[in-house]
Image: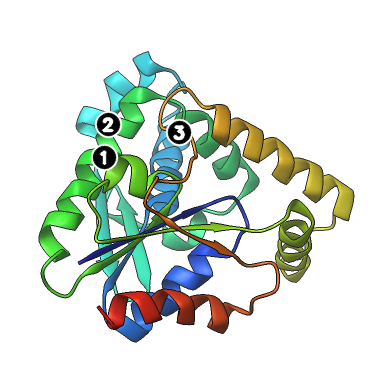
Amino acid sequence: MIVAIDGTAASGKSTMAHQVAEVSGFVFMDSGVMYRAVAFGFLKHDIESTERGAAAYLPTMNLEVNCIQSRTKVYVDEEDVSSRLHTSRITEMSSRIAMLRGVREFLLGVQHGIGDRFDEDPGVVAVGRDIGTVVFPDAEWKFFVTASPEVRARRRLAELSQTGIETSFQEVCDAIIERDRQDSQRVIAPLKKASDAIVINTDDLTPDEQAAIVLKYILER
């Protein structure tokens, strides 16, 4: 079984997917981590964020993705970089390369391989922005997670403060609104709800309540 969870930035989809994977015993596939790993490689080897750069680098990129229960670990050049992917430079580069067709096609192959390997046993919980529409359009279950920009900004601000990053609520809210615009207007694989996806608004839900909604569907089938 493949469970596809898509949604807007800071909507709570990754936390939800973690919990669903832990309870269900499915492996956890985080597509965002994969894009960040590719961005790490681009920066490490000073690759330009263009289709030409992607075409030159990706065929020889040494990328390994290890999906385990509730975590996706990634290796670049045989080095575990999973804990080094959330710097501002990685975030910026990840946003740029995510718009490249070559990068998306490269990672689509990786993601399909994970789906083929774990679909039957134990199952896959996959989270991203185009999982149910592009990566696994035939997934047994599809969910689209959203929340208001204000709620998402408060959550993101709390996360940033825990890491010592100081910014204002308005700056974070404006950035989220701009990210929504970029994601929805992207030419390649834009963020959109699959026609058969179940919508979950997390404005007034705790992480446990969010996960419980998904688990109710997939475990009572």
Whether residues under marks 1 and 2 lie with C-beta atoms below 8 angstroms apart, the answer is: yes
Is the residue 80 above or below the residue 130 in the image?
Answer: below
Seen at 34% across and 31% down, the residue is 103
Seen at 15% across and 64% down, the residue is 119
Image quadrant in which the N terminus is located: bottom left
Q: Which mark is residue 105?
A: 2
Compared across the picture, whether 58 is left or right of 183 comes to left
Whether residues under marks 3 and 2 lie with C-beta atoms below 8 angstroms apart, the answer is: no
Disc 3 marks which amino acid?
Ala
Tell me how far mark 1 sits from mark 3, CA to CA. Answer: 12 Å
Crowdedness of circle 3 by 10 Å Cα count: few (<14), some, many (20+)?
A: many
Q: Position of residue 217 (x, y in %)?
A: 35, 75
Tell me how far mark 3 sits from mark 2, CA to CA. Answer: 10 Å
Disc 2 marks which amino acid?
Glu
According to the image, label 1 marks what residue?
Answer: 108
Give whichever of 161, 11 is nearer the camera. 11
What kind of element bears circle 3? loop
Whether residues under marks 1 and 3 lie with C-beta atoms below 8 angstroms apart, the answer is: no
According to the image, label 3 marks what residue?
Answer: 98
Is the residue 210 above or below the residue 65 in the image?
Answer: below
Q: Which mark is residue 76?
A: none
Seen at 41% across and 32% down, the residue is 189
Q: Earlier in the sequence, mark 3 or mark 2?
A: 3
Tell me how far mark 1 sits from mark 2, CA to CA. Answer: 5 Å
Give whichever of 160, 169 is nearer the camera. 169
